[in-house]
Amino acid sequence: MATVNNPGRDAILARIRAGLRTPARELPSASSDGEIFEPVTNPLERFQQECKANLMECLKTSDAAASAQQLAQVLQSLPAGVIFVQDDPKLRSIMEMSRTERPIRWSSQGAPLEASQATVTLAEALIAQTGSIFVTASCGGRGASVVAPCHIVVANVSQLVPDLKTVLANASKQGRLEQTSFACIISGSSRTADIEKILVQGAHGPRRLVVVLQTGP
Amino acid sequence: MSTTPAQQFLRDAATKSADLAHRNIIRHNMESYDTAHLKGRGRFKDWEAARRKCQEIKREAVNHLDKYLLQFEEKVIAHGGHVFWAADGAEACAYIADLAARNSVKTVVKSKSMVTEEIHLAAALEKIGITVWETDLGEYIVQLRNEPPYHIVTPAMHLNRQQIGELFKEKLGESVPNDDPGQLVALARRKLRQAFFDAEMGISGANFIVADSGVVAISTNEGNGRLTTSVPRIHVAVTGIEKVIPRLEDLATLWPVLATSGTGQPITTYSTMIGGPRRPGEADGPEEFHVVLLDNGRSNLLGNAEEREVLHCIRCGACLNICPVYRNIGGHTYATTYPGPIGSVLTPHLRGQEFAHLSQASSLCGACTSVCPVNINLHHQLLHNRHDAVKTGGTKFSERTVFRLWRTAMQHPQLYALGGWVARKTLRLLYGVGLSGSVLDPMRVWSRKRSPVPLPSQSFRARWKKDLGRNIGNR
């Protein structure tokens, strides 16, 4: 299908190959082949530090009950309206424990509604180096992390990886991008500095990104 | 006689560099950028090693471009997407317009993409009756003003909040108290929100396309790129063929380097990877995914080993920000899709010798080269282009004569001394009767808008003999 009615394809490839017959110039020898990034020594501490710099909220909890309580508090602070939750047994149980009375739309029912007040999802991993969360389409789909004004991520410290290199190598090894159509490394709330370089949070996506970070099982 | 791009460039450069309001806005923005950029570089343990790594990644990709593009294509098709190779802008626009027509698309949302600016995609879609919304805030602002982006990363860098407030009041019919940036953003968000949910097609660019995983990598801060690629039924990613990189892990270096060079951030807020349409069992996402690979003159650069390195560019905008010429004449003066040093290098290759004058829009100071995150030797590329322009376009008789005289003088010290003496005497005479800057003044280019350069009473050589040389020799 892709090559049907695409006369340009072979012509472009032929031009590329003709051009590449000219050998590349020598690369001047390396002046420094040192380590690019400072290695991450304390992932949890670094993650919390970077979250703060990214203007994310990181709420540390000890167990599922405490996580449910934190979640309930965040939900209480939001205006009335439906919330969208990734349909996962773990989140079903936490939502139940949180005793929220809000209407819930589960990801198994389809995309989040435009009017959702918040979305609640899991993450695939947390990245200490940049204070980021790694999500894929398995975490409630694509809109789950961007449609609502508030995105709440329920995660466990065991999901922390030191850096971007590790998270991408793992994703590659496990074939995550073969299995899902979408992945994203999210490092803070939606923002813009297009007007006079002044930082404004909540451009098109969430104004708030909350990580409920559970230390115990 | 119609104006050539070169004449227009000189005219606009003179106007812009004398526009004090413009200077203030650009100075403010560039100073904010400088601070953030320097701080950002400080976060790396070894910034030079990072640049070197990025250079190696792009070099590997560009030197095996056919192999990596085919690998990417195979993966995208295996994941249910479509790949279209477009030789030029017309082919790319025709493919997308046809796709839109077949699917009865009425509304398109776009996230920021310089390649779509290059091929004038929005105009092509509007011509067949489609409403096109630019959704990046800066792009939305310049779209409302009906002008091209001023900068490749911050399209509305030339405007202050008052001008944006005025624009919104005029075009959107709502005013914001004190032109508060937060409220201006909120107003744009409200206006664009409906467009996202109405649109049948979302069009994005790509910062990288990854061969080994078949994904398009898009960096955005606002989240508009996320909505553009999540909500509408069809997603089209338009990208240049040079954007391919070999491995997913390469992003671990490229993302932080791109973000640092672009805005000073450690990483862009949303670093997205998209590998196809929505899969069975996924909650949402487009049903169709198309990638348009655009050549549009890029493959012409491959045949020359030096020019080929221009294709390493990751479009971070760092060379624009540091460039003393860009900072004074502004982005629109270049009248090209890609302004600043990279634009001056690239445009004559993509659009022909009509833009050869841009190679002269540089003092060859090398600031651009010093910040380029993929180590492109930009000022040498400009020199290379000047060489090309002379070889193909030739030079004016007057220019050749002057340089011939100069060469002779440089080879004959007595003649040089005589020339210097004549010039000093003549200029002194001219300036003495107030003819500085007049048509008779050989220094007119400089002095018609400036006070004349003070003339030395003696030649440099005479001063050197007398005391200059001795003072230095004694040290």
Image: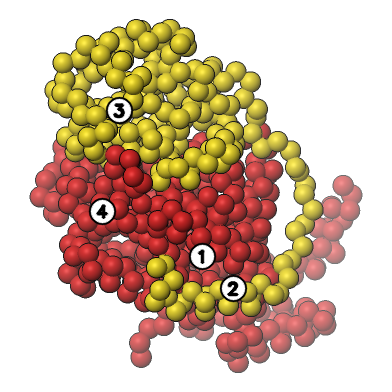
Residue at the spot 58% in from the left edge and 77% down from the top edge? A14
Mark toward the viewer: 3 or 4: 3
Name the residue nearer the viewer: A117 or B85. Answer: B85
> Up-down: is B234 above or below B403?
above
Secondary element under disc 4, as helix, strand or loop, is loop
The residue indicated by pointer 2 is A16
Chain containing mark 3: A
Q: Earlier in the sequence, mark 3 or mark 2?
A: 2
Residue at the spot 76% in from the left edge and 43% down from the top edge? A32
Which of the chains is red?
B
Question: To which quarter of the image does residue B183 belong?
Answer: top left
The residue indicated by pointer 3 is A87
Mark toward the viewer: 3 or 2: 3
Q: Earlier in the sequence, mark 1 or mark 4?
A: 4
How much space separates mark 3 and mark 1, taking CA atoms?
39 Å
How much space separates mark 3 and mark 4, taking CA atoms?
23 Å
Circles 2 and 1, Cβ within 8 Å, touching? The answer is yes
Mark drawn on residue B241: 1
What kind of residue is marked 1? Ile
Specify the quadrant that holds the C terminus of chain A.
top left
Question: To which quarter of the image does residue A41 belong?
Answer: top right
Secondary element under disc 1, as helix, strand or loop, is helix
Lateral position of residue B196 relative to residue B255, left or right: left
Question: Does the image show residue B75?
Answer: yes
How much space separates mark 3 and mark 2, taking CA atoms?
47 Å
Please provide percent x and percent y for residue A124: 45, 30
